[in-house]
Amino acid sequence: FGQGKRFATSGLGDALLGGWLVSGIYTARSGLPFTVTQSTNSVGDGATGVPNLVGDPEGQRSVDSWFNVAAFQLVPSGTFGNAGRNIVRGPRYAVADVSVQRRFRLPGTSAATLRWDVFNIFNRANFGLPARNVTTATIASGTVGTITSLAGDARIMQFAVRVEF
């Protein structure tokens, strides 16, 4: 739209629609890998104990049950479990950000730029990693394997005015 473009090349159409700049960023990634741990398994200073893997860790992939908790068996403290590192993946992440701006000439050598930025324009919920510490208490309470956090913000908008003089 606007002067030198295909549509609304002059007059009111050019004044209202011409000169706008639209840009965007789409970010996507597969789920982050994570390790299911067992905090009641003390295997040494600075080391994280893991349970035994006795089944398929893939679960329902819902916020209430992301991975198969029954696939992990608790081991006595001081015992090295056989569950591997980063064998389960968390939720995928995707977000689209858009920016719309236009520069207006002011009298003399001055100008003003109006800008509207929208982050996560589709307001997609990006979930965080699930609770992954397998203990007798977390199994009994049903908290292990559940997702209770977000990996990003809800839709955020900001307006900006930049004046050049």
Image (spheres, helix red, strand yellow):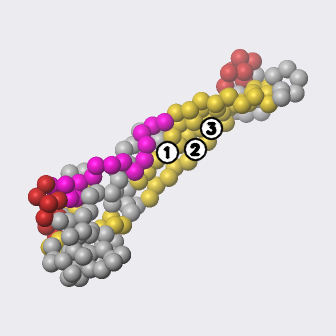
Q: Which mark is residue 22?
A: 3
Highlighted magenta segment, given as a residue range: 142-156
Left or right: 91, with 108 as reference point: left
The reply to whether discs 1 and 2 touch (Cβ–Cβ < 8 Å) is yes
Question: How far across and how far down the image is residue 90, in percent?
Answer: 33, 60
> Height in image: 128 above or below 108?
below
Give the labeled residue for mark 2: 24
At 87% across and 27% down in the image, what residue appears? 109
Specify few, some or many for label 1: CA neighbours under 10 Å numbering under 14, 14-19, or 20 or more.
some
User: The C terminus lies in which quarter of the figure?
Assistant: top right
Question: How far across and how far down the image is residue 13, in percent?
Answer: 69, 21
The Cα–Cα distance between marks 1 and 3, rounded to whole angstroms, is: 13 Å
* Front residue (pair 16, 70): 70
User: The N terminus lies in which quarter of the figure?
Assistant: top right
At 22% across and 62% down in the image, what residue appears? 67
Specify few, some or many for label 2: CA neighbours under 10 Å numbering under 14, 14-19, or 20 or more.
few
> Height in image: 138 above or below 106?
below
State the predominant SS element of the stretch in magenta. Answer: loop
Give the label, 1 or 3, closer to the camera: 1
The Cα–Cα distance between marks 1 and 2, rounded to whole angstroms, is: 7 Å
Which quadrant of the figure has residue 22? Answer: top right
The reply to whether discs 2 and 3 touch (Cβ–Cβ < 8 Å) is yes
- Seen as rendered, the residue at the extreme top is 12
Give the labeled residue for mark 1: 96
